Image: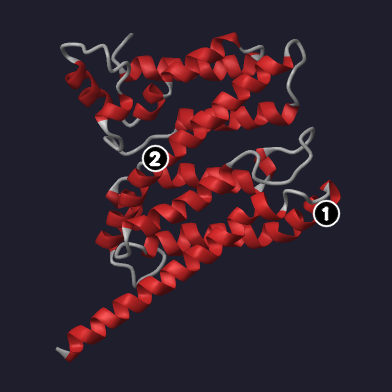
Amino acid sequence: MQNNKEQNYEKYNIEEIWKAIIEAYDMIFSQRESVFKNMKKSHKELVSNSSSEMKISIINFIVNVLLPNSLHIQKEMQIRLLILLDIGSSLEYESRNESSGSVTSSISKVCISNLFELCKFKTPEILKREINDKNFNPDDYVKIKEKIAKMCTPILIKRCKEILKKFLADEIKSGSMPLSRSRLEDIKYVLEKLKKLEIYPEYNKIDEMSGNKEIQYENEQEIMNYILKKKKSHLISLLPLLSEFITTKENEIKILVKDIFKIISSELGIK
């Protein structure tokens, strides 16, 4: 009986420690909206630059230490850690010069790169070869990495949708004027990552990938089941949004989107 009490107490303490760590990180990553709001641009850049190294260290700690060791903590806490990466991946997260700043050299890139990496499909054999800590149980490592990947994928896809939508809206607003080179590099980076990404099949629910709910096709369930077994199903879920890029003025982006359409066609068995 005493041993059970000690085990329960130890588990409670561990959960409280995890909760405290996550809340502290949440405060650091969420402070921009409240603390930076009325700050002068020069001061904002100074504060942002001085804290960037600490934030990158936190990101690396979350990805390389906390998440791989989170098998026995509550799912809610795992999701909160992933949401911190999502917050950081926002293109507006950092204070930067919009005419020259780019996600390719910012905390934003570190976060979104890690989101892509966490979602990436890997066989159990590849995952086991990644283990650097000899104290890790290989089967537990595979289990937690697959679990995190499947939880992370909807978060990543939602973030990518927001990035794509914002680019399309900005391009419309710009009229005949081209967007800055940094904005083009941002969207190219995301599209390239999406193109190369392979995810764990069936990460999503069928109803989240279905189209118009008022139109029910006879074989819709079979079609969705077929799509969700594909490692490129994330591209199919983004198809309506990607189709809007046919009007973009940027040839490099058109080529990327064309390549993605070819992948989607291949996934659907269309030659």
Which of the numbered marks, if any, corresponds to residue 18?
none
Please say if 168 is above or below 234: above
Please say if 263 is above or below 40: above
Image quadrant in which the N terminus is located: bottom left
Name the residue: 64% across, 49% down. Answer: 107
Mark 2 Cα shell of 10 Å, populated few (<14), some (14-19), many (≥20) = many
Please say if 242 is above or below 119: above
The secondary structure type at the circle numbered 1 is helix
The secondary structure type at the circle numbered 2 is helix
Q: Is residue 219 left or right of residue 55?
A: left
Label 1 sits on what residue type? His
From the top left corner, tell me how far across and down residue 166 is, in percent. 60, 26
From the top left corner, tell me how far across and down residue 152 is, in percent. 40, 45
Q: CA distance from mark 2 to mark 1?
A: 36 Å
Name the residue: 47% across, 49% down. Answer: 83
Residue that badge 2 annotates: 153
Mark 1 Cα shell of 10 Å, populated few (<14), some (14-19), many (≥20) = few
Q: Is residue 98 left or right of residue 254?
A: right
Instruction: Please tell me which residue lies in front, 136 or 247.
Output: 247
Quadrant of the image occupied by residue 199: top left
Evaluate whether residue 192 shows in this view: no
Label 2 sits on what residue type? Thr
Mark closest to the chain's N terminus, 2 or 1:
1
Name the residue: 38% across, 29% down. Answer: 234
Please say if 187 is above or below 15: above
Q: Nearer the viewer, mark 2 or mark 1?
A: 1
From the top left corner, tell me how far across and down residue 16 is, in percent. 40, 73
Residue that badge 1 annotates: 43
Q: Are marks 2 and 1 in contact (CB under 8 Å)?
A: no
